[in-house]
Image (tube, rainbow, N blue to C red):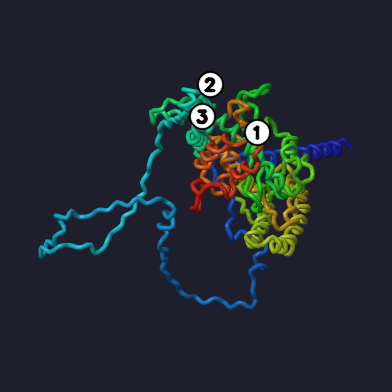
Amino acid sequence: MEKRAESLTLEEQLKKLEHENETLKALVRWYEEQFKLAQRLRFGSSSEKTHPDQLSLFNEAEAVADPSGEEPTLESVTYTRKKHKGQRDIKLKNLLTERVEHRLPESEQTCACCGGALHEMSTEVRRELKVIPAEVKVVEHVRYVYGCRHCERHGTETPVVTAPMPRPVQAGSLASPSSVAYIMSQKYVEGLPLYRQEQHWARFGVELSRQTMANWMLVGAQWLSRLYERMRMHLLRQDILYADETTLQVLREPGRAAEQKSYLWLYRTGPSGPAIVLYEYQPTRAGEHPKRFLEGFTGYLHTDGYEGYDQVAGVMRVGCWAHARRKFFEAVQTLPKNVPSAGTAAQEGLDFCNRLYAIERKAEGLPPEQRLKIRQEQSRPVLDAFLAWLLKQKDRVLPKSVTGAAIAYCLNQWDRLQGYLMDGRLEIDNNRSERSIKPFVIGRKNWLFANTPRGAGASAIIYSIIETAKENRLHPFYYLTYLFEKLPQLSDRDKEALDKLLPWSPSIPLTCRVFNSTN
């Protein structure tokens, strides 16, 4: 009996040790995944492209097989790639052209052979790009005051008439529409922080401190806020919107440490209706902020999986397949080098996502009705198969692994992920928002933080005007200059005149527009 009891004890200890060993192996595996994921995020490529042959790995035979097809014959094909003519002309067609002619002096227009006169038989043209650096000059606004000689001599009162003069951007300041626009575009388009702009202005011979430039931008943002509110009103009238958020550090925020994260929220329209991109600064990531900003909006809202957007009333949330795909892609990247990805749960999940994106590429550019029909006929069966696969894999994969997290994300977000099947105008992901928030993320790497909440709010307004201008194919500098010329002259009650300044208005002058293929 004692030996039997001792044997049972040893068996229990062995099982316990085996369980602990498996737990430790799983923990080591999890740390390896996290390490590889961190290394990839820090040093690896940001591309998440999949080789085209990978799209149909698990159904390649069924998708590609053609019993009626003939066996190929071997042949050699050679070709010469022809370079299209006129590409340079296309690139330069919107630029001003300065013509410089080079002729022989009359004394040299004599034939060296017979001494006869030479005539112009043809020309040779060489093209160069000439750069004209920025120029700074002082503009004096001189306003004349007029009086009446007769009344001065004979009258009891002398009427005085003053010539009209446009209101300035900032009274008692050197700020002009172009200088404020230049500082804004340098910081928010080119990513040049104010301390470097200070050095830039010094090379022009102008001692312009960063404090002065900061004040100019705050005043400029006040003028732009009028346009910002009109853009927000038009945004809320749409029935399809996109939203996202990113972090922002604000140093001097009352009641908060400088290290605490603040947030810049993004709201924008889709391909239908006017292109509007709006940013809003808020100290937290609470769901009350999109709830307040989007008050009055009803329709579809493209977002990632953040639950805070659930507080927005009257909307149908549409999930983001780019986030779901990225999680499976990262799971593939964390696989051990000696383990082939084919046949793994991570690769199979990625293949499902790739199939959905392949269908979307085929339907790209089609009318919404046709896109919806294709999705119902082709995407719906893939989604049903994917859901069945997710439910089967849920209990087979470690929940805390990268693959397990990807599966859990898809199951938790499933209703939203399949939301794009409801309307042909909807998109499969929220990449439109991510592309719009990227300029801010890039700019943040240069200027790092905002000093005060007021500065952060001003930055959000300026970014909104600039990015919306770019979406509407306007040149940010010339458009901002135009706004600062017009806005100080308008009454707050003149909504019609304010609407004529909106980036998509046909009243915007041609000088503000960009006509080439890129902004």
Q: Amino acid at mark 1?
A: Tyr
The residue at 61%/47% (across/down) is 333
Q: Mark 1, residues whose alpha carbon is within 10 Å: few (<14), some, or many (≥20)?
A: many
Mark 1 or 2: the one toward you: 2
Question: Residue 512, how many percent across, how many down?
Answer: 51, 46
Q: How many marks?
A: 3
Residue 305 visible in image: yes
Q: Label 2 near label 1: C-beta < 8 Å? A: no
Toward which corner of the image does residue 32 lie, by quadrant? top right
Cα separation, mark 1 vs mark 3, equals 46 Å
Q: Mark 2, residues whose alpha carbon is within 10 Å: few (<14), some, or many (≥20)?
A: few
The residue at 42%/66% (across/down) is 81
Which of 257/175 is in front? Answer: 175
The residue to which callout 2 is attached is: 156
Q: Earlier in the sequence, mark 3 or mark 2?
A: 2
Residue 281 is marked as: 1
Mark 3 or 2: the one toward you: 2
Q: Mark 3, residues whose alpha carbon is within 10 Å: few (<14), some, or many (≥20)?
A: few
Quadrant holding the N terminus: top right
Q: Secondary structure at mark 1?
A: strand
In the image, farthest residue toward the right: 1
Residue 161 is marked as: 3
Residue 29 visible in image: no
Q: Amino acid at mark 2?
A: Thr
Vertical arrangement, residue 199 with respect to residue 28, above or below: above
Q: Amino acid at mark 3?
A: Val
